[in-house]
Image (cartoon, helix red, strand yellow):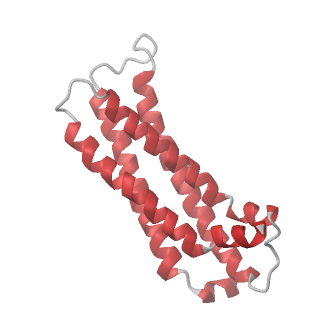
């Protein structure tokens, strides 16, 4: 019963749909946080939003990156369409590494603000660091949107022959 479930959960369409769903809060974050920048003296809520989205980006990036490992754990390797699955694994790995790296960059921007000013002085640049974190969320959203397109439309079956 677990194998069929994992087969569905690791399918390119499920992954594409989940990536699309994750893009929604990322887009909302871009709108909401950008409206608050340089208008509010206290950006704690905006920092928490960027931090939360960054954690989602990191987590989803790790899951994408390890699609092949998940298929291995649940005995889904070496099927009749293994070359095709390997192509999907490769695409997920690449986009996962990108999502993970960009999410970490967004997190670093916010964490720099949280470090006491006696260690790293960020007093006058807090808004810029939140903006930089927001920039990374935007880049991650674009990357994830591209991943959705690849999963749904642009993953050519002919690429499986190359593996």
Residue 19 left/right relative to 66: left
- Compared to residue 138, the image places residue 38 above or below, namely above
Image mark count: 0
In the picture, measured across the screen, residue 13 lies left or right of residue 79, that is left
Any part of residue 23 in sight: yes
In the image, 59: left or right of 21? right
Residue 120 location (% of width, % of height):
43, 18
Residue 83, placed above or below residue 126: below
Rendered residue at 29%/26% (across/down): 125
Up the image or down, 154 lies above or below 67; here it is below
**Residue 57, position as x, y percentages in the image:** 50, 50
Q: Residue at x 61, y 60 (%)?
A: 64
Quarter holding the N terminus is bottom right
Residue 82 sits in which quadrant? bottom right
- Nearer to us in this view, 19 or 129: 19
Residue at point 65%, 72% (across, down): 8
Q: Is residue 89 above or below residue 160?
A: above
Residue furthest top as drawn: 118
Residue 80 x %, y %: 79, 86
**Residue appearing at x 38%, y 52% in the figure:** 26
Across and down, in percent, residue 39 comes to 16, 32
């Amino acid at each position: 019963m677990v194998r069929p479930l994992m087969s569905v959960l690791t399918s390119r369409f499920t992954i594409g749909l989940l990536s699309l769903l994750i893009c929604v809060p990322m887009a909302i974050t871009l709108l909401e946080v950008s409206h608050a920048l340089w208008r509010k003296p206290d950006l704690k809520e905006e920092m928490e939003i960027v931090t939360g989205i960054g954690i989602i980006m990191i987590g989803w990036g790790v899951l994408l990156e390890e699609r092949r490992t998940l298929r291995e754990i649940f005995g889904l390797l070496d099927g009749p369409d293994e070359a095709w699955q390997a192509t999907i694994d490769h695409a997920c790995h690449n986009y996962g590494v990108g999502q993970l790296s960009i999410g970490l960059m967004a997190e670093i921007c916010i964490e720099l603000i949280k470090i006491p000013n006696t260690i790293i002085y960020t007093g006058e640049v807090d808004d810029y660091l939140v903006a930089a974190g927001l920039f990374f969320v935007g880049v991650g959203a674009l990357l994830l949107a591209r991943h959705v397109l690849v999963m749904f439309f642009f993953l050519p079956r002919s690429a499986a022959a190359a593996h």
